[in-house]
Image (cartoon, grey):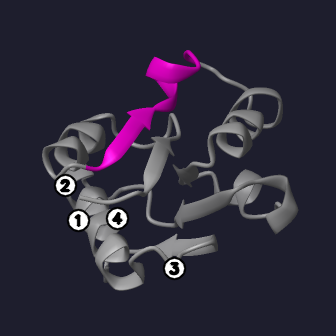
Amino acid sequence: MSEWRFPLDENIDPKTVTYLRKEGVDVEHVRDTLGEGADDEAGILPYVRETDRIIVTSDVSGFGALTSDSHASVVLLHDDTMAAYSVAAGILAMIEAYGNQFSGRGQLDPWW
C-alpha cells in the first residue's frame, strides 16, 4: 500500500499493528523489535534514524520536545485513550493525505 514504515512505541496498543498490516502497511511494535522497556534515546531514536522509519507515540513530553534532527520523523498521538482501530484509521488517513510527501512531525488526533 505504501512506502511508509512505522514502529509503534510501547504506549500504542499492539492491536494497531494487526489493523495496519491488513492494509499493507510496513509496521512493527517496539516491544517486538527492540524489546520491552526500550529506552527512547538509546534504543528507539537510533533505530528510527537508521531504518528511516516514522515513530508513532503518545509520549508527547518525551518525543514532542525533540528537535527534527534527532529523529527521522514522529507522529504524536495526543489522545492516548484512542482505540487501536482509531489509531490505525488515523495513520491510514495520514498516508492517504500526505502520499510520500510526509517528513518531520505530525499530530494524530481523533479527527483523522
Q: CA distance from mark 4 to mark 3?
A: 14 Å
Residue topped by disc 2 = 85
Q: CA distance from mark 2 to mark 1?
A: 6 Å
**Picture disc at residue 91:** 4
* Labels 4 and 3: the sequence-earlier one: 4
Residue topped by disc 3 = 101
* Labels 2 and 4: the sequence-earlier one: 2
Q: Nearer the viewer, residue 43 or 48?
A: 48
Q: How many marks?
A: 4
Q: Which residues are magenta?
A: 25-36
Q: Amino acid at mark 2?
A: Tyr
The percent position of residue 54, horizontal first and vertical second, equals 56, 54
Residue topped by disc 1 = 89
The percent position of residue 17, horizontal first and vertical second, equals 29, 39
- Check contact, mark 1 vs mark 4: CB within 8 A: yes
Residue 40 appears in which quarter of the rendering? top right
- Check contact, mark 2 vs mark 1: CB within 8 A: yes
- Observer-side mark, 2 or 3, equals 3
Q: CA distance from mark 1 to mark 4?
A: 5 Å
The percent position of residue 33, horizontal first and vertical second, equals 51, 21
Residue 94 forms part of the magenta stretch: no
Q: CA distance from mark 3 to mark 1?
A: 19 Å
**Picture disc at residue 35:** none
Q: CA distance from mark 2 to mark 4?
A: 10 Å
Q: Please tell me how crowded label 1 is: few (under 14), some (14-19), or many (20+) other residues with Cα within 10 Å.
A: some
* Labels 3 and 1: the sequence-earlier one: 1
